[in-house]
Amino acid sequence: MIKSCILMLCSVFLLLTIETAFAAEPGYTLIEAYQTTAATVDGKWTTATEWSDAYILPMTGTTLGANGIWAYKMDSSSTYLMSFLIESPDSTNDATDKWVICIDGSNDGGTAPKADDVKIEITGHTTLTMYVGTGTAWSVIANKAVTWKDSLATSAYNSANHYILELKADKGALGDWGANPPPHGVYVSMYDASNTAAGTVAWPPTSADNPSRYGLIASYDATVPEGTSIAFITALSTFAVAATIFMKKRVSLPKL
Ligand SMILES: [Ca+2]
Ligand SMILES: [Ca+2]
Ligand SMILES: [Ca+2]
């Protein structure tokens, strides 16, 4: 009992430490999962288990389902290749539909994007634009070898046809910070121009322009057992992720 209490207190302390140090949006945390299966960038679940080795989160609320999900995993076998999946409830092809992924490479926050911050924006299901921070705003840059594909497809999370995005980016090509492991800030969003009432649906529900309120890729996990799904739910993530990181780091508790 005493050890359980100590573990809980340590986990809460670790969480507070993470959130204080990295200034991420509270409650929006994940771990960089090392993939066991490489994703095929074809805008759909190529196999039923293609993303089962990723860290999967709901875009909104606490339920993995038709309102949208996103997933992230890392291939460290040769380059540090970041793979993203985003599923939107959107099923209409509009010229101003938008996917956005932002990464704060050094995770140094700030209320405006800096030189280590990148934004990947895909508009109208056709056009990718990349940006880097200037210190006060975003500046367009050439595509840094990001590959992507979206399409209308079904999935285990939404049986109706809906847009699914798959995207890969090499950390090393994105910036000087690419040689570093997490922590990285991360923000993803989707916008359906046929559903302006919903507006931009984002994880976290903040702004792409404000890295201090991005979510957090807090750590990495090179030991995910093959075939094991590590899907989590945001509602559990604040405490559970802190505890998971705590356990995975195998920090020794003082013997009482
Ligand atoms: Ca695929
Ligand atoms: Ca649409
Ligand atoms: Ca930054």
Image (cartoon, rainbow, N blue to C red):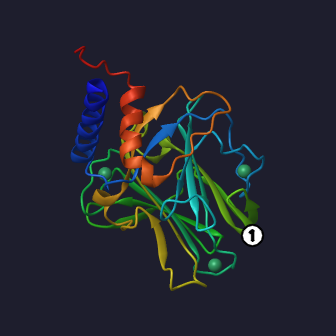
User: In the image, is 102 to the left or to the right of 82?
Assistant: left
Along the line of sight, the residue nearer the viewer: 44 or 253: 253
**100 sits left or right of 240 in the view:** right
Q: Position of residue 3 (x, y in %)?
A: 29, 24
Which quadrant of the structure image shows residue 54? top right
Quadrant where the C terminus sits is top left
| Residue 60: x %, y % from top left | 49, 65
Q: Quadrant of ligand 2?
A: bottom right
Residue furthest front in the image: 1
Crowding at dot 1, Cα within 10 Å, few <14 / some 14-19 / many 20+, comes out as some
Against 4, is 67 above or below? below
Residue 35 in the image: above or below residue 45: above
User: Residue 23: in sight, yes or no?
Assistant: yes
Query: In the image, what residue type sits under mark 1?
Result: Ala
**Residue 40 at what x, y percent from top left?**
72, 46
> Does the numbered disc 1 mark a residue whose Cβ is under 8 Å from ligand 2?
no
Instruction: Report the side of 158 relative to 56 (left or right).
Output: right
Q: Residue at x 65, y 32 (%)?
A: 36
In-front residue for pair 35/82:
35
Q: Quadrant of the N terminus?
A: top left
Element at label 1 = strand
Residue identified by numbered label 1? 160
Residue occupying image coordinates x 39% and y 38%: 182
Q: Nearer the viewer, residue 52 or 238?
A: 238
Give x and y (percent) for residue 100: 50, 64
Q: Residue at x 23, y 38 (%)?
A: 13
Q: Is residue 130 above or below residue 249?
A: below
Can residue 181 be seen? no
